[in-house]
Amino acid sequence: MKFALVLASVLLSPVALADVYKCVETDPVTGQKRVTYTNTRGAKGCERLSEDLPVSSVPGAAPAKKPGASSPGAFPRVSSDDQRARDAERRKLLEGELAAEQAALEEARKAFAEADAVRYGNERNYQKKLDRLQPFKEAVEQHERNVEALQKELSGLR
């Protein structure tokens, strides 16, 4: 057992004692220097560290965010009166769209009912009639989904 431990430590020791290089690179955009540590000799700017210096591979802590800083300082602020006016304008626009969509839904339902009332002579097979009515049915379903989405959006407004 002891022999296996000694053998493993001898085999792994070159890995543990590998050379460590400190590379300093300058970012061409910001001009800031960035330091990286590696076990392989990289491009220019890398120098071998002496073996007695400890090198940590644990990343540093991320900078803490300020509690009230959700937007940049130069981000434009809107007064509450302006925001209320915008909300009212949006509500008015959505109500207009809802009314237009409800009218389109009623018209699509009417067109579907008219097409459903007619049966042509070549439609002895009922599937042919269903195939002819499918676009009308899809139009009704699309308008119903649009009305539902607009109502949901209106209910979410303040």
Image (tube, rainbow, N blue to C red):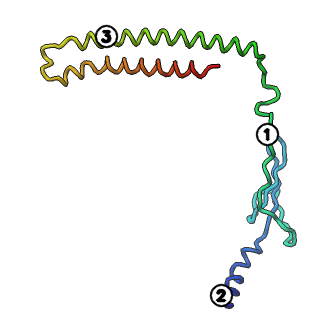
Nearest to N terminus: mark 3 or mark 2: 2
Disc 2 marks which amino acid?
A: Ala
Write down the residue under mark 3: 111
- Could you say which is closer to the camera, residue 155 or residue 147? 155
Write down the residue under mark 2: 4
Structural distance between the alpha carbons of marks 1 and 3:
63 Å
Q: Is residue 116 left or right of residue 94?
A: left
Residue at 73 percent across and 77 percent down: it is 14
Q: x, y (%) of residue 24?
A: 83, 54
Are circles 1 and 3 on residues that touch, CB within 8 Å? no
Write down the residue under mark 1: 29
Disc 3 marks which amino acid?
A: Ala
Foreground mark, 3 or 2, reads 3
Q: x, y (%) of residue 33?
A: 84, 48
Nearest to N terminus: mark 1 or mark 3: 1
- Could you say which is closer to the camera, residue 145 or residue 59? 145
How packed is label 3: few (under 14 Cα within 10 Å), some, or many (20 or more)?
Answer: some
Structural distance between the alpha carbons of marks 3 and 2:
86 Å
Residue at 78 percent across and 21 percent down: it is 77
* Mark 3: secondary structure: helix
Residue at 46 percent across and 12 percent down: it is 101
Indicate the quadrant containing the N terminus: top left, top right, bottom left or bottom right: bottom right
Q: Is residue 54 left or right of residue 124?
A: right
